[in-house]
Amino acid sequence: MKNILIPKTNLSKISVFLIWLFHTCGLIGILYIDRELFLQTTPFNLSMTFILLFFNLEEVNKKVIIALTTAFVVGMIAETIGVNFGILFGDYEYGENLGFKIFGVPFLIGINWIVLTFITGSISSLIFKNSVYLSALLGSVLMVILDIVIEPVAPKFDYWVFSENKVPVFNYLSWFLIAFPIQLVYQKMVEKKENTFSIHLVLVHFLFFSIFIIADSAS
């Protein structure tokens, strides 16, 4: 695992450096400089994260495109149903800091489904190298855990907000049930999985939101 954390190529080194730089600057800016100003850069941050992930893929072929498209389309459909009908995730709506919306759902949410699927799927495939189903299961669990970490921060960042600020338990169950088939597609379609960038990005996500939760609760 130690060697996997060390970027090997110049592209990987630059990409890992940039995601740590973006999130470190963002955290400092949100906590100590100008929260609203730095939160407005969220669409840029998410877009750059996806671009860096894409260029760090081991290969881009028809199967990989299918995995990318599946994550985006299924994620957007689920979110559209959730926002407009109050089912799947609960009664919630998106704020303004995630950019332009399609039927009430930010386009970048679909992109985020791709990013989360690929980085968690990559890590889970390292642990369960010989089992597509166990890898998909672990990848889905990791996606739910990431959602749990993000949820307390989301309303404060004007990402999304649940009715009465209460996240229903079935939100996480729905996340898992939707993530699992997407993870299965990823595990079966993406044969050469990128690891280094994915591990760093998962670590960045956990640290970014966890540190904000701790700092915000202490203030």
Image: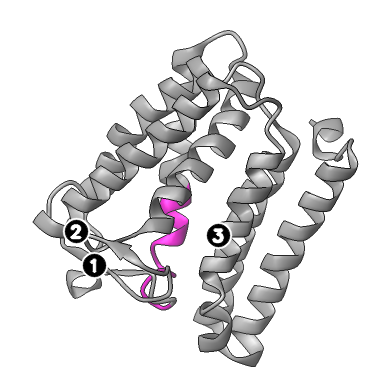
Q: Residue at x 51, y 79 (%)?
A: 40
Q: Around disc 3, counting alpha carbons within 10 Å, would you say few (fewer than 14), some (14 to 19), or many (20 or more)? A: some
Name the secondary structure under disc 2. helix
Rendered image: mark on residue 46: 3
Q: Quadrant of the N terminus?
A: top right
Q: Which residue is mark 2?
A: 83
Q: x%, y% of residue 41?
A: 56, 75
Q: CA distance from mark 1 to mark 3?
A: 19 Å
Q: Residue at x 39, y 70 (%)?
A: 159
Reading the chain from its start, which is encountered first: label 3 or label 2? Answer: 3
Q: x%, y% of residue 12?
A: 81, 43
Q: Amino acid at mark 1?
A: Glu
- Cβ atoms at labels 2 and 1 below 8 Å apart: yes
Question: Does the image show residue 138?
Answer: no
Q: Quadrant of residue 19?
A: bottom right
Q: Amino acid at mark 3?
A: Leu
Reading the chain from its start, which is encountered first: label 1 or label 3? Answer: 3
Instruction: Identify whether 136 is placed above or below 115.
Output: above
As for residue 151 lying within the magenta part, the answer is yes
